Amino acid sequence: MSPAAANATLRPELALAAETGARLIAGIDEVGRGALAGPVTVGVVVVDLDALPAEALTAGTGVWPELDGVRDSKLLAPGARKTWHPVICQHARAFSVQHSEAEQIDAVGLSAAMGAAGRAGLQEVVQQLGRTPEVVLLDGVHNWLQTPDIPVRTMAKADTLALSVACASVLAKVERDELMEHLAGEHPEFGWESNKGYGSARHREAISVSGPTRYHRHTWKLTQHALPGL
């Protein structure tokens, strides 16, 4: 197995706990950032380090046996993502998946739409937990979450390294893919069952011929290969 395809572990979460004292950590990741159609989707997975099996905390390995094999969703085949989805939900202390639709992305911009979905996800896990996670571990180097009441730590490649974030990416990917497959039944010409709303040649050509739907991001350059920035 190449280093890029290594399974995620709890080492980043344990390092964060050693630095801050936090034991209840929310990993957050998004999917659909670069799509032309459909929502941007944010997954939140909370791990409670005080409730983990001893194996995950010994020898500094950070390996959680029941979740050993979870990786960033982009490194898992579709069937593997679907297999892991219920396992992650079973073992997470709390979890949520939230969507910001194309209309909202057009109205407020991508970063703000991602932040709105992420904050909604945090509100849901707070309701599940009856308390607020002590810290958020966010994939990337830009704090698009902008939550005022929970400290946020950004981490490059957290979705490949940190288990909570990898789990969040899997939940978000599975649920967004299923949504796009459902929407493909309404608009079969765009091929959303395979491209999931991203800018494939077939998708762009169909937009040129048929025009965009209400599920498209109308402020984006839908028939060109240049994507807007954040």
Image: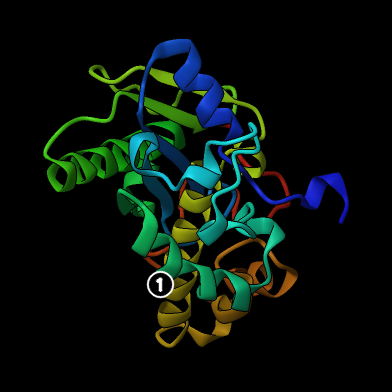
- Residue at image position (62%, 69%) is 208
Check disc 1 and give the amino acid type.
Leu
Q: Is residue 118 left or right of residue 222?
A: left
Residue at mark 1: 179
Q: Answer yes or no: is residue 36 visible.
A: no
- Whether residue 159 is visible to the viewer of this picture, yes or no, is yes
Q: Horizontal placement of 200 versus 104: left or right? A: right
Q: What residue is drawn where x is 63% and y is 31%?
A: 60
Q: Measured along the vertical axis of the image, is residue 89 above or below residue 190?
A: above
Residue 64's place in the image compared with 161, above or below, is: below
Indicate the position of residue 41 as horizontal and vertical percent values. Answer: 42, 52
Toward the viewer: 171 or 143?
171
**Where is residue 13 drawn, in percent x and y?**
51, 30
In the picture, measured across the screen, residue 155 lies left or right of residue 213, that is right
Q: Which quarter of the rendered picture does the N terminus lie within?
A: bottom right
The residue depicted at 45 percent of the width and 59 percent of the height is 171
Which quadrant is the C terminus positioned in? top right
x, y percent for residue 82: 52, 74
Q: How many marks?
A: 1
Q: In terms of depth relative to the viewer, which is nearer, 159 or 3?
A: 3
- Residue 199's spot in the image, x, y percent? 66, 61
Secondary structure under the numbered disc 1 in the rendered image: helix
